[in-house]
Amino acid sequence: MTPWLVIYAIAAGQALLLAAALWRRPNDRQANRFLAAWMLLVFVDLTVRAWAQHDQSLASFKPMRMVALFPFLHASAFYIYVRTLIHATPLRWRDTLHAAGFLFALTISLPLFLMSGAQIEQALATGHSLGFWALGAGSSLILFGFSLSYIAVSVVAVLKQRKQLRDTQSDRDPGELRWLMAVAVSQCGIWAVALAQLFLPNRWIANELIYVAVSAWVLLAGYLSLLNAGPPARPATAPQRSAAEDPDGNASADLDPRFDDVAKRLSALMDQGIYREIALSIAQLAQRSGYPEYLVSAVINRRFGYPFWDYVNRFRVDAAKRCLADPQDQRTALEIAYDCGFSSKSTFNSAFKRFAGQTPSQYRAAASGQPA
């Protein structure tokens, strides 16, 4: 029994367990069921590789060559998962077009899969490359680039969504999407190992090492997705536009005579405690202020100097600090967080650490003169 077999078998088992857990998870149901199906694909991949390590006969040759094409599905699967998770868009039939890289490699490899065992043995004995692998390093590099482009597009989508959350939502911590960046980086690591194995072959970069990286990725992607269970994804609405905006889509604040009035109205609403409303959005704040959403957004960003998330949560954190510093207030930090408008512990802790420079428990201990 080789060490590779043990690693692949353990990772395959983990992939199967994660698929079952993700399928049953209630939040972000569509995205998590897609991720579960993706984990099942990885389970098949690693299972075949574990079998091939145990039985390196011709019987495992074709299955191994088939699963060797799966990497051309993984990057596009990551893109579809990211899109489904952050935008809550349903899967569509045209999403099958994202399998173009895999289908191209599969089409080239079809003659191999139609060959008899004797024909394969004869081709291998004469040193011929078979199927997709006959294309050479140059063609492989094109397909690698095609796949990596999906990861790049996914990263851009995550960054845009984080910005949009910060600009429009107060109860969704933009940092909750950081784990997707970690998954993207780990996927790039797998492709880096594959490229090194293709162009810099040496005894330290064996083909087996690629799937050790895949095994590690299974644990990272699966468990991070389970740990980041937050509220269901919902598409953030873009600020309303009007003729007062410039061609780039930014409010012409300096030209709008209502700018000072909006700033005063927002400050008055905050003094009245509107920030305590759970899941307060910029659309709701604009409606309560009586001014257009685009103008409210411009005032918050330009006059107050913060994106919406920072603007609202600074008030919430200040209110929480007053409660935590009050020796008569015996509520837990989480009870105080909910009373101040936070909708989750993770968002509260993230905002408090960002604006107070320490955790709520550290702040309360320091305010009471006790060691943290």
Image: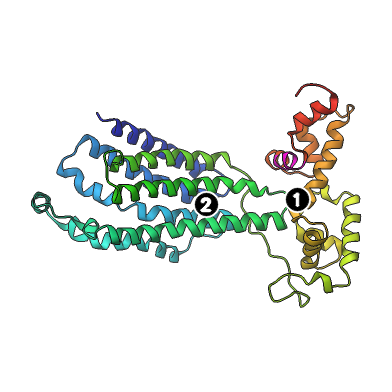
Task: Please tell me whether residue 151 belongs to the stretch shown in magenta.
Answer: no
Q: For residue 31, which numbered disc appears in the image?
A: 2
> At 53% across and 55% down in the image, what residue appears?
155
Seen at 44% across and 63% down, the residue is: 95
SS category of the residue bearing label 2: helix
Q: Nearer the viewer, residue 94 or 73?
A: 73
Q: Nearer the viewer, residue 222 or 19?
A: 222
Residue at screen point 70% across, 54% down = 166
Q: Quadrant of residue 299?
A: bottom right
State the quadrant of the C terminus: top right
- Residue shown at 34% from the left, 33% from the top: 7
**Residue bearing the label numbered 1:** 310
Give the residues drawn in magenta, as a range.
Answer: 350-355
Q: Is the stretch drawn in magenta largely helix, strand or loop?
A: helix
Name the N-terminal-most of marks 2 and 1: 2
Mark 1 neighbour class, 10 Å CA radius: few under 14, some 14 to 19, many 20 or more:
many
Could you say where residue 351 lies in the image, as x and y percent from the top left?
Answer: 73, 43
Residue 330 place in picture, x, y as percent: 84, 27
Q: Is 115 in front, or is 36?
A: 115
Q: Is residue 142 above or below residue 314?
A: below
Q: Amino acid at mark 1?
A: Asp
348 versus 235 height, above or below: above
Left-right relation of 66 to 264: left
- Cα distance between the residues tagged 2 and 1: 28 Å
